[in-house]
Amino acid sequence: MTNDIYALMRDHVLTALRAIVPDLPDDIAARVEVTPTRDQAHGDMATNAAMVSSKAARQAPAKIAAGLVAYLGEAPGIAEAAVAGPGFVNLRLDPSAWRALIPAILRSGESYGDSRTGTGVKVNVEYVSANPTGPMHIGHCRGAVVGDALANLMAKAGFEVTKEYYINDAGAQVAALAWAAYWRYLQAIGTTLTEEEFSNEVPGGLQYRGEYLIPIGLALAAAHGTALATPDLGVAAPAGWIDLVRNFTIDAMMTEVRTDLAQLGVQQDIFSSERALVASGAADTTIDRLAADGLIYEGVLEPPKGKTPDDWEPRPQTLFRSTQFGDDVDRPLRKSDGSNTYFANDIAYHADKIGRGYDILIDVLGADHGGYVARMRAAVKALSGNKTKFEAVLCQIVHIMRDGAPVRMSKRAGSYVTLSDLLDEVGKDAVRFTMLTRNADAQMEFDLDKALAQTRDNPVFYVQYAHARCRSVLRAAAEQLPPASITETALAEVNLDSLDAEAEQTLIRRLASWPRTVDAAALAREPHRIAFFLYDLASDFHMLWNRGKDDATLRFLQQDQPERTLARLALVTATAVTIRSGLAVLGVTPVEEMR
RNA sequence: GCGCCCUUAGCUCAGUUGGAUAGAGCAACAGCCUUCUAAGCUGUGGGUCGGUGGUUCGAAUCCACCAGGGCGCGCCA
């Protein structure tokens, strides 16, 4: 049983259409939709059924529409059906059909809007997946929030969702991290080396000079004394310490990452380690699998046209025929020195996910990885026999703004570098909501002042305030009415006939569109639509509230009219429930009051 | 040079996957506060949906080309 009134009406329309066009093809039926009208003058909903089916039926749209009108005019809950424009059928519902939604919402609670659209489809959403080489910064934050909200959204739409983090704990970056931690260790035990002298000993030079590694160095010193250095406290042979230091540092960094994620309200189901994958030989196994299908060869790539790197020279590499699966060029899996590329490991990782039986793999990536998507899609196609779908959600850059000016991403004091700093100032809920007020694939400005402002142009506040107002009304009601009469269960039974004001109708219609908003947003992989829905819902509610300022008879609590009051409390409660349902998708905690 | 993304009101952005007269906030203008929370509210003005063609009953949405912006382009991740 669905709570989506638009889906219910679509069923009616399809039944009617099949009566008129008996051999209606499935693909045509799939295109039939029932949507809210933009303009109330056109009724409550409209369907394109006549226009869509006209060719298959070999009948004029107007004629089919007339048939639909005759049929639908008799359907339960429909007050009026009419042909309009080029063949739309406009429907006006009985007010009681709209109101019937309120008890349905109250009975569903926060599960209102859940759907079965994704039932039986296993989805893996991979997000954040940062190098564990330092604390999380703002660049990671958007991906974390978008990925988490997308996973919640798809779960609400019925998909079987796994949230996953891929730890990039293999490769050169992590080796550099180990060296950087080792430097802090040497400092902790009192080395006489200068930073530059040390850097000269490091392959590629010292990276990661941030102070966040100092505690790691101290901890290593406490645990191992001077055992990891030469007797004169200099650089010992890496073989004697690098594994130990790297593992210790990665563990510490990941602990910090998990703390940051927890503060952001992100809880992932699985953390997969690239290093464990490499150690298991999965990359080579995967390359062998591709080779068995004839998709691997030794070759030399052409330099990119128009932009030949200065140091370019042709070198033979192990290549994957990704062009057979829609990529632009074949991609290297082994470097010219024979070691595996990051891509090779990542293919192996995706092969692992395919092996776990997912139907859809979604990677939430930074926009600078956009060029990576085609090759990964090709690899997933090749490895799954085209059964597993690969999708990427790209997150564009976020510019942090304060006082109308961009906040530099430098490590100087006063600048925001880490996620933790941002959370301390703005708070989890404002960070999450604000990050979701733009399409992920559009650049966004994060205005620190606005995120904290208590005004209408701060969506976080505006939505939270709407919820707080709902709760405020209910608190006031609890002082006038028996508590048992205003529970969700009790309110689901009250007579709602008195809900006839226009602003009330508008609000009910908005509540009614929640399930279809969830479905559409989940299918489009666009969690930001939920934020916009909530803003619109809040707007409708505030509008209704404000009507009560001009006209006292429109206030929710009417002392002398208990039945009307209960009906309005049912509407208010349904609004609060729906707001909570939406905030839950975004991972934002609803507030009870604002003082 | 090639690929991907973007271009909608003065500004920041939506636009229900091709539907009817393109929407919201801010800014501007005109009104409004004895109140269930004015932490605001009501109303008005504001558009060649970057441009030109095409596809069809119908295009901001799909296709082609052009202009402008962003990202990427072998052995980084």
Image (cartoon, helix red, strand yellow):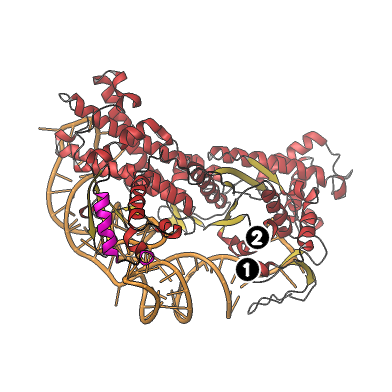
Whether discs 1 and 2 lie on one chain: the answer is yes
Q: How many marks?
A: 2
Residue A181, label in figure = none
The image position of residue A83, as x and y in percent, is 23, 58
Distance (Cα) linking label 1 and label 2: 10 Å
Identify which residue is drawn at 43% across, 40% down.
A583
Residues B59 and A594: in front is B59
What amino acid does circle 2 point to?
Answer: Lys
Considering the whole magenta stretch, tell me its main secondary structure: helix
Residue A326, label in figure = 1
Identify the image quadrant of residue A259.
top right
The image position of residue A143, as x and y in percent, is 55, 51
From the image, tell me which residue sits under label 2: A381
Q: Is residue A578 above or below residue A318?
A: above
The image position of residue A280, as x and y in percent, is 80, 48
Q: Is residue A505 magenta?
A: no
Q: Chain of mark 2?
A: A
